[in-house]
Image (cartoon, rainbow, N blue to C red):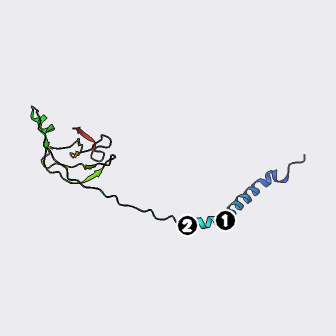
Amino acid sequence: MEDTRSWYKKKRFLLPIGVVGVLTAIGIANANPQTQVQSDIQAPAPVVQEQQTQVQTPVVVPVETTATTADETQATTKSTAPLSNDNHYQNVDGDSIHSPAYTQDNSVPAGASAQCGDGTYSFSAHRSGTCSHHGGVATWY
């Protein structure tokens, strides 16, 4: 029985034709001058602009409570004690917020919204992300 298929459709020619096709495609890709020029072009270095933060001194206002027990008084009394740092960050609203900090006498500072798991007090305006790098929220105020 005689094979009537065209020569390039016969099995013994398929592999060599495929190899030649792949090598030709590689050669064309390497010979393309546009590809060479693009690989020589370097992207410009990104320009980094420093963000200026406005540091505001927090206004500390003492708050009186009508708590009856010592535990309630400790948890709700707002202290004017100095904080362990004076760092601030800008929140999503664009407001300058005091970074989480410790108090020297372990009392709740004025303006604190939560106590973090590591003992710092957070002044966050929103619950989302509060104390995220300080062990999570231990107590909300």
The answer to whether 92 is drawn above or below residue 141 in the figure is: below
Q: Amino acid at mark 2?
A: Ile
Residue at horizontal 90 percent and vertical 48 percent from the top:
2
Residue at horizontal 56 percent and vertical 68 percent from the top:
40
| 64 displayed left or right of 51 | left
| 115 displayed left or right of 30 | left
Quadrant including the C terminus: top left
Q: Residues within 10 Å of mark 2 (few under 14, many from 20)?
A: few
Assign a secondary structure to mark 1. Answer: loop
Among the 4 quarters of the image, the one containing residue 37: bottom right
Work out how far the residue at label 2 is from the one at label 1, CA to CA, in angstroms: 15 Å
Where does the image place residue 44, in percent across and percent down from the top left? 49, 65
Where does the image place residue 93, in percent across and percent down from the top left? 33, 46
Outermost residue to the top: 68
Q: Nearer the viewer, residue 35 or 77?
A: 77
Q: Amino acid at mark 1?
A: Asn
Q: Nearer the viewer, residue 21 or 44?
A: 44
Q: Residue under circle 1?
A: 32
Q: Residue under circle 2?
A: 41
Quadrant including the N terminus: top right
